[in-house]
């Protein structure tokens, strides 16, 4: 296996330009974020923030200051509403398991959408094995949840509703405010959780304004370091810990806090919200340049998700008919363009994206999908380079592979 990888890497030698668009699955960390993190590895605040000595007090101060910054960007009432976790997956697990298990005496019904990330979908399915009833709300062909189906699903037995603010694969900006109003109108005791990882730093999102009970955010989705995220828990809302161990400053996640990563998360948040409107408008322009260029230049292409303001400013997801997505990602990589086919969680299983299936795509269409995300650091020249590479790559794969043979 390692020899095969070495051969693949050797085949990439001599690339004149590289454009990384796989931000959904990981990202390079801006130098400003790296510089902010470095002192906390070996110069200051390297202690355990629960211990009573100088390095410990420095660490405690640093974690709290980072929480305060993120709380401000989220629109929290207090910094205590920000609970750091190792990432989005862990935050979603705490939200669903912690809320459901604590409230199981009040009811055993959980409502999600068909297109939630796997860290919500799989946890819900695990709870189903423990006796909970799971209702999955369908979406239309652009990924918008069916609000009438949601209205019919919520009842006195519903303890939790979890709906993403922005879909991670096709960029659909969901009507969360309307959904929350429906849920609370049907059952004011039902907790409302949203995975806001693809909303935070990219669209207007404010937990106080929306009045959600729980919200997940991720560091690497805003170009911060991997290995940290946060769960917002509204003041007064109770969530049970799902792991036990040494309790530090984070009441919902045991263990010693990773101070450098938390600092990096806070710095990435600062950069994302600095000149927020300018950043978002820039991403939107680059998104449309890439999206329109692909759809306009290449025949037999399907755009997945909506257009305009109802789509996340960074998201481009297209299906190339008669073109297998995994083969295309390799071909593009050999030309210095880095993308993903479907989500990172499903691509190694060679299964079609559950999101694309839910919006009505055939297996052959879903298997030919490519996901790309732009950032404020991309230039128009990057997008133009991609638009020069993709048509040739698609033509080559179609010529070699033809139809996927999957219907």
Image (cartoon, rainbow, N blue to C red):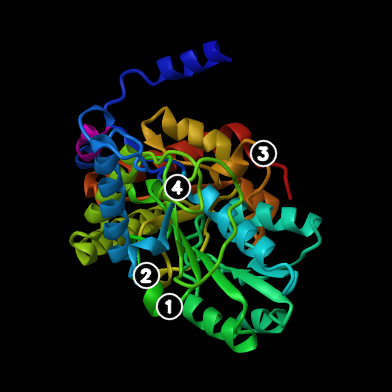
Q: Which residue is mark 1?
A: 210
Q: Earlier in the sequence, mark 1 or mark 4?
A: 4
> Can you give x and y, in whole percent of width and height, for residue 61 in the image?
26, 48
Identify which residue is drawn at 67% across, 38% down: 349
Q: Earlier in the sequence, mark 2 or mark 3?
A: 2
Please say if 357 is above or below 10: below
Crowd around label 4: few <14 · some 14–19 · many ≥20 (10 Å) = many
Q: Nearer the observer, disc 3 or disc 1? A: 1
Dot label at residue 350: 3
Which residue is at the far bottom?
185
Dot label at residue 205: 2
> Can you give x and y, in whole percent of width and height, for residue 375 in the image?
30, 50
Crowd around label 3: few <14 · some 14–19 · many ≥20 (10 Å) = few
Which residue is at the far front?
52
- Secondary structure at badge 1 equals helix
Which residue is at the far top?
3
Q: Give the Cα distance between marks 4 and 3.
A: 18 Å
> Can you give x and y, in whole percent of width and height, for residue 35 in the image?
19, 36
Q: Which residue is mark 4?
A: 24
Q: Which residues are magenta?
A: 35-40
Q: Give the Cα distance between marks 3 and 1.
A: 37 Å
Q: Earlier in the sequence, mark 3 or mark 1?
A: 1
Q: Earlier in the sequence, mark 4 or mark 3?
A: 4
Q: Specify the quadrant of the image occupied by residue 226.
A: top left
**Do the numbered discs 4 and 3 sit on residues whose CB atoms are within 8 Å?**
no
- Secondary structure at badge 4 equals loop
Crowd around label 1: few <14 · some 14–19 · many ≥20 (10 Å) = some
Along the viewing direction, whichever of 42 and 93 lies nearer the viewer: 42
Q: Give the Cα distance between marks 2 and 3.
A: 34 Å
Q: Nearer the observer, disc 4 or disc 3? A: 4
Identify which residue is drawn at 71% across, 82% down: 155
**Do the numbered discs 1 and 2 sit on residues whose CB atoms are within 8 Å?**
yes
């Amino acid at each position: 296996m390692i020899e095969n990888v070495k051969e693949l890497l050797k085949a990439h030698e001599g690339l004149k330009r590289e454009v990384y668009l796989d931000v959904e699955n990981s990202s390079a960390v801006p130098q400003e974020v790296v510089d902010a993190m470095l002192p906390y590895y070996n110069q200051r605040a390297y202690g355990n923030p629960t211990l009573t000595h100088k390095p410990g007090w420095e660490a405690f101060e640093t974690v709290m200051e980072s929480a305060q910054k993120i709380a401000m960007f989220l629109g929290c009432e207090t910094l205590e509403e920000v609970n750091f976790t190792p990432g989005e997956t862990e935050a979603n697990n705490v939200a669903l398991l912690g809320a459901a298990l604590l409230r199981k005496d009040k009811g055993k019904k959980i409502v999600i959408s068909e297109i939630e990330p796997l860290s919500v979908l799989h946890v819900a399915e695990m709870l189903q094995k423990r006796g909970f009833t799971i209702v999955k709300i369908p979406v239309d062909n652009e990924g918008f949840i069916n609000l009438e189906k949601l209205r019919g699903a919520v009842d006195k037995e519903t303890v939790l509703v979890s709906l993403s603010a922005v879909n991670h694969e096709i960029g659909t900006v969901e009507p969360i405010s309307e959904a929350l109003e429906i849920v609370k109108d049907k059952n004011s005791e039902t907790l409302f959780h949203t995975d806001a990882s693809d909303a935070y730093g990219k669209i207007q999102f404010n937990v106080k304004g929306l009045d959600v009970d729980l919200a997940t955010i991720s560091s690497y989705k805003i170009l911060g370091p991997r290995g940290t995220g946060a769960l917002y828990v509204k003041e007064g809302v109770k969530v049970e810990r799902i792991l036990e161990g040494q309790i530090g400053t984070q009441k919902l996640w045991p263990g010693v806090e990773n101070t450098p990563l938390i600092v990096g998360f806070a710095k990435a948040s600062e950069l994302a919200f600095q000149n927020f409107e300018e950043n978002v408008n820039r991403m939107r322009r680059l998104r449309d340049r890439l999206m329109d260029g692909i759809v306009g230049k290449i025949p037999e292409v399907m755009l997945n998700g909506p257009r305009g303001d109802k789509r996340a400013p960074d998201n481009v997801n297209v299906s190339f008919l008669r073109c297998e997505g995994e083969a295309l990602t390799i071909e593009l990589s050999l030309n210095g363009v880095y993308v993903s086919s479907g989500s990172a969680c499903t691509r190694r299983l060679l299964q079609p994206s559950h999101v694309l299936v839910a919006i009505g795509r055939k297996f052959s269409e879903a298997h030919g999908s490519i996901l790309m995300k732009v950032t404020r650091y991309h230039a128009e020249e990057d997008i133009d380079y991609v638009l020069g590479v993709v048509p040739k790559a698609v033509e080559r794969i179609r010529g070699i592979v033809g139809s996927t043979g999957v219907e």
